[in-house]
Amino acid sequence: MMNPTSDPIGRCEHDLKTCRWLLSLYTSRKINFSELANRLLLIDLLVLCDPCRRDFIASLDRRIAHDLFEAVRDMLEPVDFRPVPYAFLIGVETPEELEKKIVLFKPRYESIYRLARDRAAGIDEVVDESIDEL
């Protein structure tokens, strides 16, 4: 098994491949949006380095980015960008260790929020314009 700290580039390549695979499952309607968003937001986007996270979100279709932003907003704003990172709790035994994990992931969640928001910016106007053209 690869150690993420010894090969961060290889780790990101693997995790980006997983993100793209999940996206392909969604676009081929093998999973629903909730399944895609939960997996991306709770696991896969959190482990990417900042540049890879930014590049993946920038590559999303604007409608998917818009829906992802809404999911991020609904999940994170009520808890001040500090949800319990359940997928990363193996080995966490004390409340202090849990708090360290939450603090570690908060900037990553904030980054996902901003990136999805920025990628989705203007989508409502684009949708309105396409309706007007009909």
Image: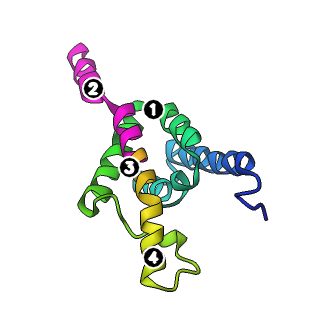
> Which residue position is annotated with label 2?
127
State how many labels appear.
4
Q: Earlier in the sequence, mark 2 or mark 1?
A: 1
Q: Which-is-in-front pick, marks 3 and 1? A: 3
Q: Nearer the viewer, residue 25 or 75?
A: 75
Residue at point 30%, 47% (across, down): 70
Label 3 belongs to which residue?
110
Mark identifier at residue 122: none
- Looking at the rendered image, the disc whose residue lies closer to the viewer, 2 or 4, is 4
Check disc 2: other Cα within 10 Å, few if <14, some if 14-19, many if 20+. Answer: few
Name the residue that disc number 4 marks. 98
Give, as a three-letter code, the residue at label 4: Leu
Name the main secondary structure of what is drawn in magenta.
helix
User: Does residue 57 appear to the left or right of 20 in the view shown?
Assistant: left
Amino acid under disc 2 = Val
The segment highlighted magenta reads 112-134
* Position of 128 relative to 78 (above/below): above
Determine which quarter of the picture holds residue 62: top left
Which residue, given by chain and number where applicable, does mark 1 sit on? 61
Residue 83 lies, in percent from the top left, at 36, 66
- Mark closer to the chain start, 2 or 4: 4
Badge 1 element: loop
